[in-house]
Every structure is written in structure tokens, then in C-alpha cells.
Image (cartoon, rainbow, N blue to C red):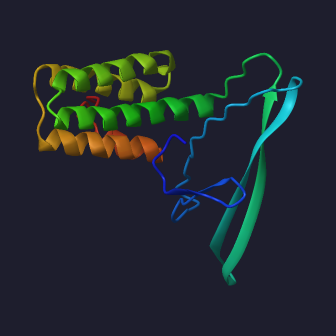
Amino acid sequence: MLQRLPTQRTPDGGWLLTLGDLYATSPKAVGLIFHVEDVAELGQTPVAQVRLVSDAVTADGIEHQVVTVPVVANLDGTDHLEPTVERTLVRFEAARAREEAIEQADRGDLDGAARKLAEASTRLAPYTSDPAVAEEAEDLRAESERLRAAEYSPRDLKYHEARSRGCWEGKEAYLRKLSRRRPRH
């Protein structure tokens, strides 16, 4: 589980994730990494089942809904990159790096925090053909330099917390507004 969402184990050994309110205009991405062991043969392999239980607002009122979706991996021996998934995962990595850097900086380890942000920027480099990812990589790099110069204050803490939250929630317009490095027009 990549995000820090409320989770608990179910009696059957599964996981229950609490997502909170969902809106059609604000989709939520959930990052899960599956490790598949002892695959008997290559091909389509079921790895999980996602069951979304909700009380949805409809034209007729509140309707209890249950939607079940199988998660199937195509284990055919070749890698298939799904751009949307890759982009989301690297944004999640950036969010986690910011959170870890905040923890280090709050402990007084500004050099460690700077390294964490610089490493995250480097990991985003292969995906910078996407303008939003390029902006995030540049922001991480510039913030790393600020930390190396011992620039860290409560404003920086708030900035990184807000950027991290924006990455977790996929709010690109919010991140553009929040950026310290807005493009000049």
C-alpha cells in the first residue's frame, strides 16, 4: 500500500481500505504493489479483487452499491508499461520523498532531507516528458538546494506538506498554483 490510508485486516485475510468520500469530479488513485510468487505458468493471473462498497447519491436518493472488479496481471514474461499507472506511481514516490524529507528536516538533518529530495527528482527524470512530472522534478531539485543551503522554516514545512498531499490526491491544478516556481508568461 503506497498511501497512508486507514486500513485494517478482514477476517478472511484481506484488507479493508477506508477512502472517505468519493466524488465523480475528484477521482482517487490507490497505489498497491503486488508480489506474485510461485506462478505455475505465464499468462493472465488473478492477483486480487477490489470491492467498492458505497452509499451513493442518485436521482432517487441514497443507494447502497457494491462493485467488484478483478485485478488480473498479464504475466507473459515481458514488461508492459501503462503510462497512467507509471505516472501515478512516480508522483506517489515524490509525495513519500517529501514526507520523509520533512521528518529528516524536523530532526535537524537538512543534508539528509536534501539528499532525499534530490534522489526523488532523479527518479522522476525518465518521466519528465509529462509537464506536470517535469515541474515536480524541478521543484524537488530546487527544494533540495534550499535545504543544502540550510533554508528550512515552518513555511517550508507547510509547503512540502501541501505539495505531498497534492501529489497523493492527483491535484495537478492545485500543484501548479502552489508552486514556488511558476512559469513566467
Q: Residue at x 30, y 27 (%)?
A: 139
Examine the image and state in which quarter residue 164 appears.
top left
For the N terminus, the quadrant is top right
**For residue 179, side relative to residue 152 (left or right):** right
Q: Nearer the viewer, residue 56 or 111?
A: 111
> x%, y% of residue 55?
63, 74
In this picture, is 22 found above or below 166?
A: below
> Which residue lies at the image location 49% right of the left edge and 57% below the top edge?
6
Residue 172 seen anywhere in this rendered image of the structure: no
Does 1 sit left or right of 154 as displayed? right
Give the image location of residue 22, x and y in percent: 55, 62
**Residue 83 appears at what percent x and percent y?**
62, 28
In which quadrant of the rendered view does residue 43 lie? top right
The C terminus - image quarter? top left
User: Is 62 in front, or is 16?
Assistant: 16
Which x, y percent locates residue 45? 83, 34
Residue placed at 36% from the left, 31% from the top? 97
